[in-house]
Amino acid sequence: MPQFPNLLALGLASCNLHEFPNLMKLKNLTYLDLSSNKITGEIPSWIWEMRLLNLNVSHNSLVGLQKPYNINTMGFFDMLDLHSNKLRGKLPLLFTSANYVDYSNNNFQETIPLGIGNDASFVSLANNNLTGVIPTSLCNSSYLEVLDLSGNFLSGGIPPCLLQNVETLAVLNLGRNNISGDIPDTISANCGLKTLDLSKNNLEGRIPTSLANCKLLEVMNVGNNYINDGFPCMMKNSSSLSVLVLRSNKFYGDIRCPGVDQSWPNLQIIDIAFNSFSGKLFPESIEIWKGMTLNNNDQDHLHFNLVFFIYKVVQYRDTVTVTIKSQQMELLKILTVFTTIDFSSNNFEGEIPETIGQLSMLYGLNLSHNSFTGKIPESIGNLTQLGSLDLSSNQLTGEIPEKLTRLTFLSVLNLSYNKLVGKIPSGNQFQTFSAESYEGNERLCDFPLSKPCGDHVNGQQVTEVNKEEQESSDVVFYFVSAGMGFVVGLGFIFWPIMFCERWRKCYYKHVDKFVLIIIRKLRSGDNH
Ligand SMILES: *[C@@H]1O[C@H](CO)[C@@H](O)[C@H](O)[C@H]1NC(C)=O
Ligand SMILES: *[C@@H]1O[C@H](CO)[C@@H](O)[C@H](O)[C@H]1NC(C)=O
Ligand SMILES: *[C@@H]1O[C@H](CO)[C@@H](O)[C@H](O)[C@H]1NC(C)=O
Ligand SMILES: *[C@@H]1O[C@H](CO)[C@@H](O)[C@H](O)[C@H]1NC(C)=O
């Protein structure tokens, strides 16, 4: 561009460029955006000699950084964004003074160089192939607000000093690595952490009691580790907490903390599946429940409700506002967003509360593999967005509520291995479920099971009046179902594929919308 030698800023994002433009002559260029093109090859060496403040080459197919790195010391690099390319080799230590460095979603290897992000407020090295330990030099980065090292092969422990220096640090993401040992109990008194993600590592021991210092915490994810502790009640003063994921650990005991109803007014997601939690889901005090159902507009009560609902976290958008050199920047980080309530695989007992029907935007509910007793709450029929309902492997009794046929979006139903009785409701989606959805309930009858209920015989009569007849028809049922084995087997293969396909599409199309709606609904205290 010889005709514009004095250009200061050049934005060429999404211009379908296939090679790195030669801009060497634009000596005054300070801002260069080449993101979202199709540029291949290496980032040319001359770029490091420019006096750039801001370089964005993200979302290309770049494979390397040409040497030598003759860094222009006159320049003051502010932002270096190399994310989502195919960059490989050792992570270069380019501009130690840069404020914002994003090397994420590349193929960088080897260890994290000492001194990276020294003066930075944002450092992301996520989703690379980095190995070795977390360098303690990161503890000295006193401006750090966001540190994302997730999705690498980092090993060793969490440096205790890293959790000591969390006054400015708002986001610490060490998830999806190979980090082991205990979580250090060194969190400083003026903890400013808002997001702590340590999920999918090999962490052991307990949740540190000093986490009580993090009163601003919004997202806490320690899922898929080996943590052996009770419910983290030390967090009860973290009044901003909206996401708590304890999934797949060795947590045990009751999930209630005294005073939580006052303390977690913003709680939106709890995923505690695959632990050894026990007890009932609801407080002894019926008074609280009454208040909750009567004062629907009382936000505190509504949120109290949510403390007991476990959402399966699939993906959520974690929005973090960071101030970089007095400029507010909104960073969108995609982590995990919930799609279903998931209490599954714990030792919960007692009845499933009717109040579950208040969460009207849910499209997945999984309470399977617990010891729930009593009837299926009719109010589940109010969850009209529900796409998947799994209540299998519990001790549920009574009939399947007719109202469930209102769930017209339901594509997956599993009521297997309970003690349900009577006629399976018909109509709407219920015509599409196979016998597999009901197996292991010996006293259920009618389509799709091969066992008829008999003329004018409802479930009650089947169980009480025709007990003997029922037993003999069980025998018939077993024979017939053995004969049907082949068909059922086929269904078993195809059904999950169909479900996944449908789920996937639905998920990608609607997940953000749903999450927004859910969050908005919960915030507004509107439970319709
Ligand atoms: C760059 O800016 C300086 C003033 O800051 C000006 O003197 C010079 O002509 C500009 N252009 C080039 C190509 O250096
Ligand atoms: C951190 O800074 C202190 C002094 O402020 C220094 O003594 C120490 O060596 C530094 N640690 C690292 C790992 O850079
Ligand atoms: C993870 O760490 C353990 C030691 O804690 C080690 O034995 C194992 O090889 C590591 N796995 C990977 C994939 O690095
Ligand atoms: C229903 O749940 C049972 C037990 O939880 C499980 O074995 C079965 O595979 C599930 N059926 C379907 C169709 O998912």
Image (spheres, rainbow, N blue to C red):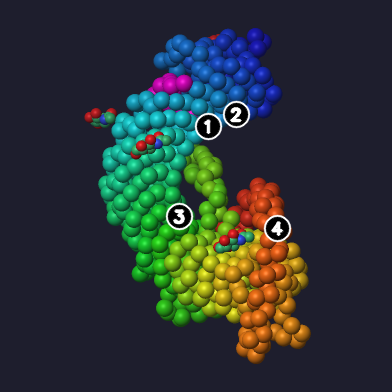
Residue 510, compared with residue 11, is above or below; it is: below
Q: Is residue 60 left or right of residue 323?
A: right
Q: Dividing the image into 4 quarters, which one contains the N terminus?
A: top right
What whole-number distance in Å separates the C-alpha atoms at marks 4 and 1?
45 Å
Residue 140 lies in the magenta stretch: no
Look at the image and tell me whether residue 201 can be seen.
Answer: yes
Q: Which residue is mark 3?
A: 247
Q: Is residue 145 left or right of residue 343?
A: left
**Ligand 2's quadrant:** top left
Q: Which residue is mark 1?
A: 105
Tell me where the magenta segment starts and ends, as one range.
89-103
Mark number displayed over residue 59:
2
Q: Earlier in the sequence, mark 3 or mark 2?
A: 2
Label 1: which secondary element: loop
- Label 4 secondary element: helix
Disc 3 or disc 2, which is closer to the eye? 3
Q: Tag 2: residue type? A: His
Q: Give the CA separation, mark 2 to mark 4.
A: 49 Å
Q: Residue at x 44, y 42 (%)?
A: 175
Label 1 with label 3: CB-CB less than 8 Å: no
Q: Nearer the viewer, mark 3 or mark 4?
A: 4
